[in-house]
């Protein structure tokens, strides 16, 4: 299992976005926990306060807390084009900024992008050759 850790500015706001807005699965019921894990197929998504994450990386020289695009995107691999549209709509209703509306991709797939409340970019993508296992994991 992989864990992706996102540093967030406001835990309560991020929990509302991911748990209540995007319907990501978690057993956590608190609205502003110290840390929260979401179950997604094959990966755990962890939210952790940005300032504490920076200090965890280095007490002496924590990395700067930059805003916006950092040269990486997270991916939500959808099983259908319709799922791409549904996830983008969930993100929109939860307060995300839609960066690219769902559309055909140059390589034959279908995708859209949103930025979450902390500026992390997510690609929601379907590909004509995507295959998924019984747990919903993309087979590479």
Image: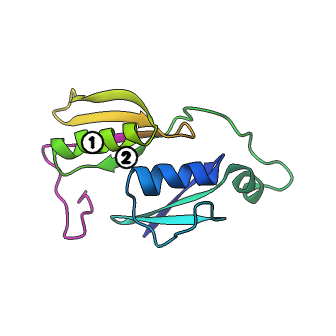
Q: Position of residue 101 (x, y in %)?
A: 30, 28
Q: Secondary structure at mark 1?
A: strand
Within 10 Å of disc 2 (Cα), the crowding (few <14, some 14-19, many 20+) is few
Query: Where does label 2 land, which residue?
Result: 75
Q: Which mark is residue 125?
A: 1
Bounds of the magenta span? Answer: 123-140
Structural distance between the alpha carbons of marks 2 and 1: 7 Å
Q: Quadrant of the N terminus?
A: bottom left
| Residue in the picture at 46% in, 38% down | 95
Nearer-the-camera pick, 64 or 22: 22
Q: Quadrant of the C terminus?
A: bottom left
Q: Is 133 within the magenta?
A: yes
Pointers 2 and 1 in contact (C-beta within 8 Å) = yes
Q: Position of residue 22 (x, y in %)?
A: 39, 51
Which image quadrant is residue 136 in? bottom left
User: What secondary structure is the magenta-colored segment mainly?
Assistant: loop
Horizontally, residue 94 falls left or right of residue 76, namely: right
Q: Earlier in the sequence, mark 2 or mark 1?
A: 2
Nearer-the-camera pick, 18 or 127: 18
| Residue in the picture at 67% in, 35% down | 66
| Residue in the picture at 73% in, 51% down | 54
């Amino acid at each position: 299992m992989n864990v992706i850790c996102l540093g967030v500015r406001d835990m309560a706001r991020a929990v509302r976005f991911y748990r209540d807005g995007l319907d990501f699965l978690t057993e956590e019921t608190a609205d502003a926990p110290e840390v929260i894990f979401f179950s997604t197929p094959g990966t755990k998504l962890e939210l952790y306060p940005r300032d504490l994450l920076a200090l965890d990386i280095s007490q002496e020289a924590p990395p700067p807390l930059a805003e916006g695009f950092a040269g990486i995107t997270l991916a939500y691999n959808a099983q259908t084009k319709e799922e791409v549209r549904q996830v983008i709509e969930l993100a929109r209703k939860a307060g995300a900024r839609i960066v690219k509306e769902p559309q055909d991709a140059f390589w034959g797939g279908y995708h859209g992008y949103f930025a979450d409340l902390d500026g992390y970019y997510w690609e929601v993508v379907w590909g004509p050759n995507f295959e998924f296992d019984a747990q919903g994991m993309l087979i590479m």
